[in-house]
Amino acid sequence: MKTMLTSHFLSVLSLALFTFIGCKKSGSGDRVEAVPILKVGGAYAVSSTSIEVSGVVTNNVSWTETGVYYMVAASGETEHYIPVTTAPQQEIHGTITGLTPNTVYFVGVYAKNSGGKGEAGYSNSVQTPSK
């Protein structure tokens, strides 16, 4: 009986220590900020070498960086990110420059904060006109 009580006591003590050591005290400094959720507003002012893109953060979070990104539709290449300055809690606007005429692109917007980077899905394809 004494062995069983000792074993039970050690099990409870181990569980208590594991819980105490393994869990952080919840406080304002330990809270993880939500990642921004975005929506592409659209592509506008399309020229042969540039596209203006807009979007908005749809959840109520702050951010430390915003920008636009693009990818050549037919290439499968990785995205190109361009940071832009945006006032907190406002729509994101940015211009992608240096593009190739008569090329199809996918464009989007992003925002970062301490929780991570949120990206909007790509817009519909946008083709730059010939010169």
Image: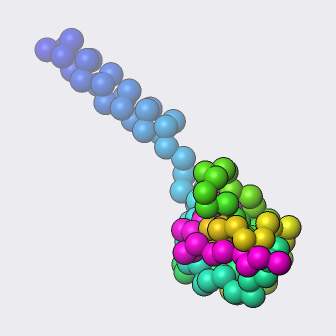
- Find residue 27 and report its horizontal and vertical position in percent: 58, 60
Q: Is residue 63 left or right of residue 85?
A: left
Q: Nearer the viewer, residue 38 or 73?
A: 73
Q: Is residue 116 left or right of residue 102?
A: left
Magenta segment: does it hold 110? Answer: no
- Find residue 69 and report its horizontal and vertical position in percent: 71, 65
Q: Which quarter of the picture shows residue 93?
A: bottom right
Q: Residue furthest left?
A: 1
The structure residue drawn at horizontal position 78% and vertical position 71%, both measured from the top left corner, is: 101
- Give the residues drawn in magenta, as a range: 114-131
In the rendered image, the vertical position of residue 61 relative to residue 2, given as above or below: below
Q: Residue furthest top?
A: 3
Q: Nearer the viewer, residue 90 or 21?
A: 90
- Find residue 73 and report its horizontal and vertical position in percent: 61, 61
> Tag count in the figure?
0
Quadrant of the rendering where the N terminus is positioned? top left
The structure residue drawn at horizontal position 30% and vertical position 25%, both measured from the top left corner, is: 11
Magenta segment: does it hold 125? Answer: yes
Quadrant of the rendering where the C terminus is positioned? bottom right
In the rendered image, the vertical position of residue 56 relative to residue 10, given as above or below: below
The structure residue drawn at horizontal position 62% and vertical position 83%, both measured from the top left corner, is: 42
Q: Nearer the viewer, residue 87 or 73?
A: 73
Q: Residue furthest front?
A: 130
